[in-house]
Amino acid sequence: MKSAFRSAICTALEFSLRSLNPNPYRKTLVLLPRYVVVFPAKPSHFTSMASSESGSHAPPSPTVLNLERQFEEFRHQLDDSGNLRERIRSIALEIESATRLMQSSLLLIHQSGPIPEVLEKAKGQIGVLKELYNKLAEIILECPGQYYRYHGDWRSETQTVVSLLAFMHWLETEGLLLHAEAEEKLGLKSSEFGLDTEDYLIGICFMSNDLPRYVVNRVTAGDYDCPRKVLKFLTDLHAAFRMLNLRNDFLRKKFDGMKYDLRRVEEVYYDVKIRGLATTGNTTGEQGDGGQS
Amino acid sequence: MKSAFRSAICTALEFSLRSLNPNPYRKTLVLLPRYVVVFPAKPSHFTSMASSESGSHAPPSPTVLNLERQFEEFRHQLDDSGNLRERIRSIALEIESATRLMQSSLLLIHQSGPIPEVLEKAKGQIGVLKELYNKLAEIILECPGQYYRYHGDWRSETQTVVSLLAFMHWLETEGLLLHAEAEEKLGLKSSEFGLDTEDYLIGICFMSNDLPRYVVNRVTAGDYDCPRKVLKFLTDLHAAFRMLNLRNDFLRKKFDGMKYDLRRVEEVYYDVKIRGLATTGNTTGEQGDGGQS
Amino acid sequence: MKSAFRSAICTALEFSLRSLNPNPYRKTLVLLPRYVVVFPAKPSHFTSMASSESGSHAPPSPTVLNLERQFEEFRHQLDDSGNLRERIRSIALEIESATRLMQSSLLLIHQSGPIPEVLEKAKGQIGVLKELYNKLAEIILECPGQYYRYHGDWRSETQTVVSLLAFMHWLETEGLLLHAEAEEKLGLKSSEFGLDTEDYLIGICFMSNDLPRYVVNRVTAGDYDCPRKVLKFLTDLHAAFRMLNLRNDFLRKKFDGMKYDLRRVEEVYYDVKIRGLATTGNTTGEQGDGGQS
Amino acid sequence: MKSAFRSAICTALEFSLRSLNPNPYRKTLVLLPRYVVVFPAKPSHFTSMASSESGSHAPPSPTVLNLERQFEEFRHQLDDSGNLRERIRSIALEIESATRLMQSSLLLIHQSGPIPEVLEKAKGQIGVLKELYNKLAEIILECPGQYYRYHGDWRSETQTVVSLLAFMHWLETEGLLLHAEAEEKLGLKSSEFGLDTEDYLIGICFMSNDLPRYVVNRVTAGDYDCPRKVLKFLTDLHAAFRMLNLRNDFLRKKFDGMKYDLRRVEEVYYDVKIRGLATTGNTTGEQGDGGQS
């Protein structure tokens, strides 16, 4: 998790000075000379009433000068932060676009496409996403300590990304894509620009929402062992989520929905079992509950 | 709650490593041993379906163990962040309470209370506020880089605080309380825990909303010079705000309201001038703006 | 505050036994014999599946009997509580009707009707209201400890009643109708069936909402002293409310609205003062702010 | 927190005096001297406009004094009731937390965990709940007659508790947990702090919602006799509810949902019967309902 720009002690020190600064631009005003010559002339729309009323063009008072200087500075701050936000938004749009391509490829899964081929295609977008998150990280690294200031601008896109990656991971391994694995796939480094825990958890909930449909379509296509496998996964996942003390927020709401996914998969598993269709699929030799229908 | 951990260079280094980390608790897991012994036994409600179905009590697979470990960690994260939020909220409530006392004292201004005495009383709360913001800063400093994660929990209270401080400052100086001055009054240091620029600007808009009422009540009480002074201040302030490129957000909406405050004060000034009431009131003889209407 | 039915110790004792009982009907089941013979025959729609399936008409098991007995009891409870609610609603409608008559009479105030005559007419409804609240109290006294169970069914009507009584009281005395005075006017006894504090406070807020209109209309009719009197009253009332730590609820919202009433009355007072119309009305000799317009 | 104050006859009398009092704090003002010295000085922010305008610092009129006294009293009332509410909320949160643990243990039932062991674990929380309800009762007993004033703060938690207790009871006895039995398990005494009938009934509806899932999972695990037993129970329960005249409220809506639970269980029973799976499952030989489909 080393990063080149933090290699020297002096940099680290300067860095730490700014790391918590909620007004980093103002700080730069002190450190850098670029704003010093910013006010060459009084903006024309900025005249004090007193002077205009009296008709005389007296120089503005020190108080007014301070006021002007402060707002000139604010103008830069707001413009800079506005530009930053636009750059973030534009990358978020690209992320959304790459995600949509990934989603299109994965849809074939529901139509019984051969899993390895479908996955191959979808994986093609991971590289694109990695690059985009890299760009995002670079932007955020420009303004230390402000990850959460702009977080809202990319979080919903990221939740979708997590849900797709986790679904692909399940198709390959039948296990849960861990938080650290998701970060690795996207080239994120926790120490600099990580994957927010709640975004990860919400993404996992989104994936859960897609599983009932997947199970139904697999059974239709004759894969009678799928419900058992998904049910096992979802039961463990649901139990894991239950360990968390969720506040009454969005994540909580999403998790509450997982109950219905679980119930739906149980129903499909029930259908398969009661018709004795699950017998041969049960390769692990779990109790020979002979469905002698 | 000492900030001692930032005293040495090595600490600064460690600090910079974490400065952008959106998952600081996870980091601590790696650095500190305290979570290492957290999982002495598998939680009993966390059994994979397969094992329970087969009847055998085989040890959980490594995959399931990873899952458990991750969610155990998340539980700590969410609990920690929930506790933090509670502590912040409790301080925000105290800030609100101190603000209310300040506001009550200042209400007497509208009933022609003698300004110095009214101010003296209201100022009594500044010390209380300073202490509360100090506590808040200590909490936020515990989790570097997360100022904006929790910002929403104290921002509206802070906007009110700014509006009151700015009003009191105007009563004393007839000038605008600058951002840096507001920070100083509250004992905030930009480099660690500063006053967010937008919160400052919104607070100033709130103050502007109170000025028409103040002017009306002063004139009612016979102070005919007040409208001119407030109008000059508000005109300059409005012009200063117009320098900013405001996005289509809350600040923009608040600023749009300032136009109506300005208009109302202009009307009162007009009422006073047209009746010749302003003539003698201009005792300080500034720029001889003789209201010989 | 004596009440006849509590005159004997034995009654008081029996009363205290029931006073906190949230399920008073169930209690009566124990004390009184009337439910003992309640289940003479099994209700025909209540057949256990087992018996119907087997075709044999075996007697229901003790378990099923207990189930039936319990729901039979619940049926009585729910019917009783439903009837009670209907009786309460019907009285609340009558209260609303009497209030509307009172309101109609008071409207004349805004059209410069002579205050004593207008009040005389409106007061005619107080007797009606007193009687209705007496009936309400009788109903509530039937079910000790359940005032707040049914409170929602008459509270909004009561808030309107308070607002009208308080306005009438102000017209007569220029002071605030106190809580105890409101209770007395309505024949309520705190020890049995009192006026809920929040209902009283909300009613007072409602009255405040009507004052700006009243002031405007009085000035139109040439009563230039009215704004000063109302402003004094409203300023004191507003300050009194500010002593309360209001939760973030309905009362808080209503109180927040009082600020606008105050501001509007200040504006009218301003209009009157700046035109020198208030001069003669100012009987208390407050600073001779000669409005020599 | 002893209930000692209800031990003597004289106390019972005093008790009955207050039993219906919707403003108990106000009452205490009269009975106890503690508020008598509460107003040592006029709050400084509470000055009538007239006096401040005239410049003279005349003592406030008796009217203003009454106003102040009343609001001072209200402040105590609202603060007391706010504190009470906070204490209640904090216990309600603990109840929710204990319930969640209970729920987690019970989830294993759906994964074919051995019933006695699962129940043993879940029962561990009953003692905790009993203690929490005891605390709640103590708080509510502090303010006689106000059970329903604060009822909304614990009712939804209590409904969940009832649903879990009733499910556990069914697992053990295949019968319905009666209202009195639920109260006994939670250590509630109807005469002081009972279980509201509607809360009990809603809790029973919640339990019904969980039964279809239970049946499906039992059949999947090879227990083909479960649908018959659950169907018998649910049919009786549904018939019992139909005896009640439900208003158009939450309980009615919940009961309407029970119809779908019943239908789903009937379908599962049908699936089992039509496949001849139910024959051997009926080991207890009740009423020989041979499923010779």
Image (tube, coloured by chain):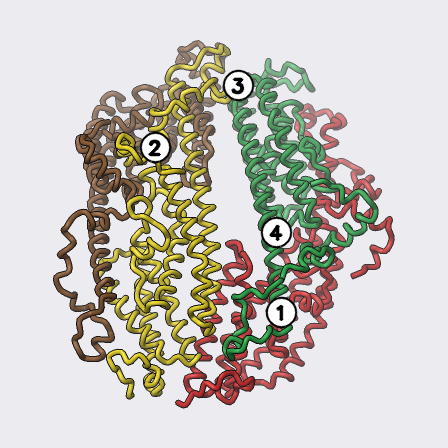
Chain colours: A red, B green, C brown, D yellow
Between the C-alphas of marks 3 and 1, the distance is 71 Å
**Label 1 chain ID:** B
Q: Mark 4 vs mark 3: tell me if same chain.
A: yes
Foreground residue among B143 and C133: B143
| Disc 2 residue type (three-letter) | Pro
User: Which type of secondary structure does the marked residue at label 3 adopt?
Assistant: loop
> Any mark on residue D24, and which?
2
Q: Chain of mark 4?
A: B
Amino acid type of the residue that numbered disc 4 sits on in the rendered structure? Asp
Q: Specify the quadrant that holds the N terminus of chain C.
A: top left
Say whether mark 4 and mark 1 are on the same chain: yes
- The verdict on a common chain for dots 3 and 1 is yes
Residue located beneath label 3 in the image:
B112
In the image, residue C17 sits, relative to residue B98, either above or below, namely below
Asked whether residue B98 is in view, the answer is yes
Circle 1 sits on which residue?
B65
Residue at x 37% of width, y 37% of height: D142
